[in-house]
Image: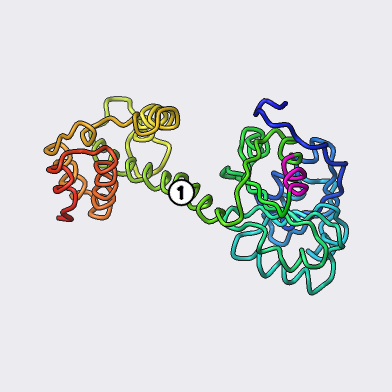
Amino acid sequence: MTSFGITPGPAPARLTMGIVSAGRVGTALGAALERVGHVVGAVSAVSDASLHRAATRLPESVVASPPDVAARSELLILAVPDTELDGLVRGLVATGAVRPGTIVVHTSGAHGIGILAPLTETGAVPLAIHPAMTFSGHDEDTARLSSACFGVTAADETGYAVAQSLVLEIGGEPVRVREEMRTLYHAALAHGSNHLVTLVADAAAALRAALAGDELLGQQLVDDQPNGLAERVLAPLLSAALDNALRRGRGALTGPVARGDVEAVAAHRRALDGVDPDLAESYRALALHTAQAARSTDTMIEMLERRA
């Protein structure tokens, strides 16, 4: 048994891998798999940034075109943006570069294995293995994979065993996602991660407006740049709130909406509207959803339902 309570299948043989392309995700995965004995034989890279990532993270790999990468590979990782995946798959089919029996993995969260159907029909083994992690493009990306969960989708139990073994090898936790649930899975991750960035940036902007011009002697001046005083004020509060939410769910909710303090929430809306009407509207929408989920008072909900 592993630390996740999962009994993996046999560890995959050492595989010669190819990666299309040398983006943040592809090079991080390639580096992680090389650490456990696989070999990235070839990688595709076009832009200066991707060429740099290939040279620094995968220095022993040959830089080649996508068809040439595919022809060299027993395990082919397609780590391209969601919008490019379908065209890449069809292009590889047209070249005939992917040999029957090649394990073809894509890293898209939005898609399952259906998008690989043209390659599956030529004898490839389709896998969708999506790391539920954000990538910065720096060395810490590879280290973070060892603490990440991976949404995996395969055509059969043999495919799931291969995907599970690959993820467990690099220290990640595989999570099965049914083909028809990939969109919902991806929506949940995007809602949590992307909208969190917007929420934090909005809170920091409002806090800068509240603090600017009243700094204490010797204190850093508040400007419009991130990683300043406003962020330092928010960091421990938001870190604790996130930790509590993950541990306790909606039971972690505190603040004026949870208390049913209509006057405080109405005052918040007026203050935020003076800074940015769009920010105030975002607050209203989130506060309304929070109030409904918390079964707040009718007075609170009615106030928040009014846009003005």
**Image position, residue 139 (x, y; %):** 66, 38
Check the image and report above or below for 124 versus 118.
Answer: above
Check the image and report above or below for 146 versus 70.
Answer: above
Q: Residue at x 25, y 42 (%)?
A: 209
Residue that extends furthest to the bottom in the rendered view of this protein? 94
**In magenta stretch: residue 158:** yes
**Image position, residue 243 (x, y; %):** 44, 28
**In magenta stretch: residue 223:** no
Amino acid type, residue under disc 1 in the picture: Asn
Q: Secondary structure at mark 1?
A: helix
Residue that extends furthest to the front in the rendered view of this protein? 157
Tell me the residue that label 1 is attached to: 194
**Image position, residue 118 (x, y; %):** 74, 69
- 237 and 193: which one is in front? 193
Please state, as top left, top right, bottom left or bottom right, where the C terminus lies in the image: bottom left
Residue range of the region highlighted in magenta in the rendering: 157-164
Crowd around label 1: few <14 · some 14–19 · many ≥20 (10 Å): few
Check the image and report above or below for 116 versus 35.
Answer: below
Q: Seen in the image, is 32 located left or right of residue 13?
A: left
Q: Residue at x 38, y 41 (%)?
A: 200
- 264 and 245: which one is in front? 245
**Image position, residue 14 (x, y; %):** 87, 42
Please state, as top left, top right, bottom left or bottom right, where the N terminus lies in the image: top right
- 203 and 211: which one is in front? 203
Predominant secondary structure, magenta span: helix
Q: Seen in the image, is 62 located left or right of residue 218?
A: right
